[in-house]
Image (cartoon, grey):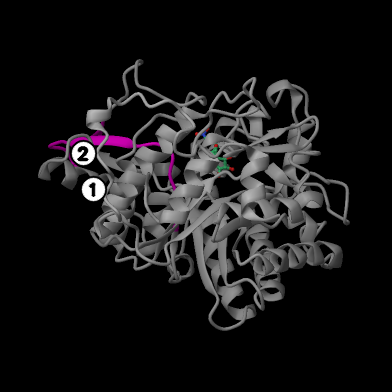
Amino acid sequence: MDRRKFLQTTGLTLGAGSLPSLVPSVLRAEPPASTPAAAKFPAGFLWGSATASYQVEGAVKEGGRGVSIWDTFSHTAGKTANGDTGDVADDFYHRYPQDIEMMKQMGLKTFRFSVAWPRIFPNGTGQPNQQGVDFYKKLVDALLAAGIEPYCTLFHWDLPQVLQDQGGWESRDVAKAFADYAGYTAGVLSDRCKHFMTMNEMRSFCEIGYADGRHAPGLQIGRKRMAQLNHNVVYAHGLSVRAIRAHAKPGVKVGLADNVEAATPVIETPEHIEAARHAMRELNAMYQTVIQEGRYTPHYLKTLGDDAPHFTQEELDVIKTPLDFVGINLYTAHYVRAADNEVGYVSVPAPESYPHMYSPWLTIGPEALYWTPKLVSEIWNVKTLYITENGCSSADKIAEDGHVYDTDRVMYLRNYLTQLHRGVSEGVPVKGYFCWSLLDNYEWADGYDKRFGIVYVDFATQKRTPKLSAHFYEKVIADNEVK
Ligand code: PNW
């Protein structure tokens, strides 16, 4: 489909004169012929979108795929909104060619997808399943043919059920199985895919899955076991970085997609900024900090007391295996202020009236997209960063005229991207941005009710309708500038 035809089908091009002007003519000065260079993102900035296997693929019983903990969990009564499962989701397993065509028309330069571990190793370990490998090879080839750079996440929460039955992320053997799977998969894809992320959001799958129990596997293991599980997960990450480097073609870049707790100064004064710097290390002690520094902060260990994890120096060395890039998933800000205490900060609680998007947890804090990459790069001397997820849920509806006017998502994205631009223009080394998500999809325990896509999906017909935000984003990409 050519570009003009795409815009006609979507019908959403708001060309000049298509809406009556609300601005008195005297105020309507001619715009400058070209925008000042200062408002632009650097040439080559990688604009993309992100998805995850279980949230979009469907086809859970096809291609020799094994069972994951999300199949089990979503099919357990009472665990997800409306009993929704990822059995069909966006049917991306079958529809990826058309979806890639749509990405191409939108001008996306990159696409972040995840590999379902149980498609590659249906039993977690052992014999690889060639049909699974072939699916991801075809997907990557289709992206490359469309001029879209693939970014591959190796674990986005769909752990093979057989491995959960052996203790899941609490098990040392599972950590080793993950490294084997990651090394194998990067090995077979690395002739065509050059960027790999080991895990997506360690904090989310550990805390929500094993402490709150709101996500698969739905456990509540308590503080002591949690501390050990967190240690095992970062150890698995480190092992997998080494395995990927051992098996992948030279030149492949390895990182992770971490939902770094986004310590943000409540007011931008030197003392609160300093507080955010301290908070960044402490709030992320069990994930990014130990990965970057190869040690737990004294405050973290002291707070845990007898519940602190057991570990060896050798494990810490594995955990801090250097990365080529850090991916940050960022949705909300964690405001902090300076305090005269042991750690130099306290968290600032949000009042009940604090604005949020359609998901109650998704509070709005655009400056976090300035502060988090800036502090991460400064504290740990990280030279290459990506925003591997940012986006929001909205109560999207198809309007009578067939369009989806998600003005709130446009508001959210515009404000966050403006803060990202602020950082990038000051030299914060963010090289790309992946909007979560391309398509409305299976939002875990929230089922299909919470829509995060810039493209609307009618789940009964699988019809895709680009929302207003897709057209906003298309314009951002085309002009390399926030509009
Ligand atoms: C992330 N919470 O998950 C994930 O990486 C995506 O798979 C997900 O769809 C996206 O963000 C939007 O939610 C989260 O309850 C899920 O705080 C839940 C929470 C946070 C992140």
Q: Which picture quadrant has residue 58?
A: top right
Q: CB under 8 Å between callouts 1 and 2? A: yes
Q: Quadrant of the N terminus?
A: bottom right
Where disc 1 sits, the SS reads: helix
Rendered residue at 56%/23% (across/down): 395
Q: Nearer the viewer, residue 239 or 379?
A: 379
Q: Answer with left or right where residue 354 lies relative to residue 199.
A: left
Query: Which residue is pictured at 40% across the width and 33% down the height?
Result: 411
Name the foreground residue: 22 vs 56.
Answer: 22
- Which numbered tag is attached to residue 345? 2
Decide whether residue 312 is among the magenta residues.
no
Residue 78 in view, yes or no: yes
Instruction: Determine which of the numbered discs, if any, sits on residue 336 in the image.
Output: none
Q: Which residues are drawn in magenta?
A: 327-347
Judge left or right: residue 143 versus residue 396.
Answer: right
Q: Is residue 332 magenta?
A: yes
User: As rendered, which of 473 and 365 lies closer to the eye?
Assistant: 473
Q: Which mark is residue 278?
A: 1
Is 73 positioned to the left or the right of 225 in the image? Answer: right
Above or below — where is 448 with respect to 33?
above
Ligand 1 lies in quarter? top right
Q: How far apart, in angstroms, are the residues tagged by discs 1 and 2? A: 7 Å
Sequence-first disc among 1 and 2: 1
**Res. 299 visible in picture:** no
Alpha-carbon neighbours of circle 2 within 10 Å: few (<14), some, or many (≥20)?
many
**Residue 419 place in picture, x, y as percent:** 31, 45
Q: In the rendering, at what x and y percent does residue 30 appear?
A: 27, 43
Which quadrant is the C terminus positioned in?
top left
As drawn, which residue projects farthest toward the top? 352
Residue type beneath disc 1: His
**Amino acid type for the residue under numbered disc 2:** Tyr
**Which residue is located at x 81 percent, y 47 percent?**
67
